[in-house]
Amino acid sequence: MKKMKYKNIKIYLISGLILFITYVCFSSQKPLKPDEADLQAIKLLIFDEKWDEALTRLDEFLKRYPSSPLKPQALFMRARSLAQLPGRTEEALMAYENYLQIKPGSISLTEEAELAIINLAGDLVAQGKKEYAPKIESRLLSPNKVVRYYAAFKLSYLKEKSLAEKSIPVLKEIISQEKDAELRDRAKIALLRVSPRELSELEEKNRAEKPLVLKIKVEKKGKKEPEVYISIPWTLADLALRSIPEKEKERLRQQGYDIERLKRDLSQAGGQIIEIRDEDTIIKIWLERE
């Protein structure tokens, strides 16, 4: 009996504690201000993709609360709603620009607005409205890398060559400096679309700038794996070869190994492999850029 009473007391205590915590949590929440409540309701409309209704409510919100601290959010949501409605592309672009003009504090929403402007301007240019091209071109100079890259990619798709070619400097920047391999590949495809010649020249330049490496591989006949594999920067290898005393070079020449000729052959081979063979060993020597 005592055990049952003790058990019931525990249940009451736990239930009471839960009720107390619930009361404290809910009572500590401040009631929403009118502008907060209105914007919360509009967010639900946007979540449900009711763009027309959301736009109407947002216009009412901006008239009713012109000084609300939530105004930047409302302006961004208004631009987004317009962008989703057919035939409102130009209005949407202007709405995003209005949002940026108030210098909003949100870095992520600012970036999203910049990307949206590029996208909308690209759609308008594709419709023949070339006056919107500067909206994309100006963002090629953006300090934000994401915005700058996106502007270049968007321009590269435009049919008018003179506009598409303005993307070339940033595309070359991506190919030469970007660490992300996927972005570099996308930039190469975009540059190939805009100017195959520029891509070819850039790749040739990049190959020329890569350091030469001397490769030496010693293989035994009948074995899959090499016995020796050496990779040395050519500048160091050349220095080492030049430092060999003349007496040693002469001795090697007598044995059939002319160092100077080998260096000359490697330089002229253009990546081709020089092989030295005997009965059971193959020595492969070549230069390549890494």
Image (tube, helix red, strand yellow):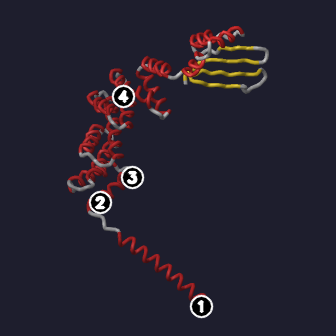
Residue type at the position of mark 1? Lys
- Which one is nearer the viewer's eye here, 48 or 251? 251
Residue highlighted by disc 2: 36
Q: CA distance from mark 3 to mark 2?
A: 19 Å
The relative height of residue 73 versus residue 184 in the rendered view (above or below) is below
Q: CA distance from mark 2 to mark 4?
A: 40 Å
| Residue that carries the numbered disc 4 in the rendered image | 155
- Category of crowding for the residue at label 3, using alpha-carbon neighbours closer than 10 angstroms: few (below 14), some (14–19), many (at least 20): few
279 or 67, which is in the foreground? 279
Give, as a three-letter code, the residue at label 2: Glu
Q: Residue 36: x, y in percent?
A: 29, 60
Looking at the picture, which amino acid does disc 3 mark? Asp
Q: Which residue corresponds to mark 3?
A: 48
Amino acid type of the residue that numbered disc 4 sits on in the rendered structure: Leu
Height in image: 114 above or below 283?
below
Count neighbours of disc 2 (C-alpha within 10 A) and say few if under 14, some if 14 to 19, many if 20 or more.
some
Is 94 placed above or below 25 here? above
Looking at the image, residue 5 sits to the left or right of residue 33; the answer is right
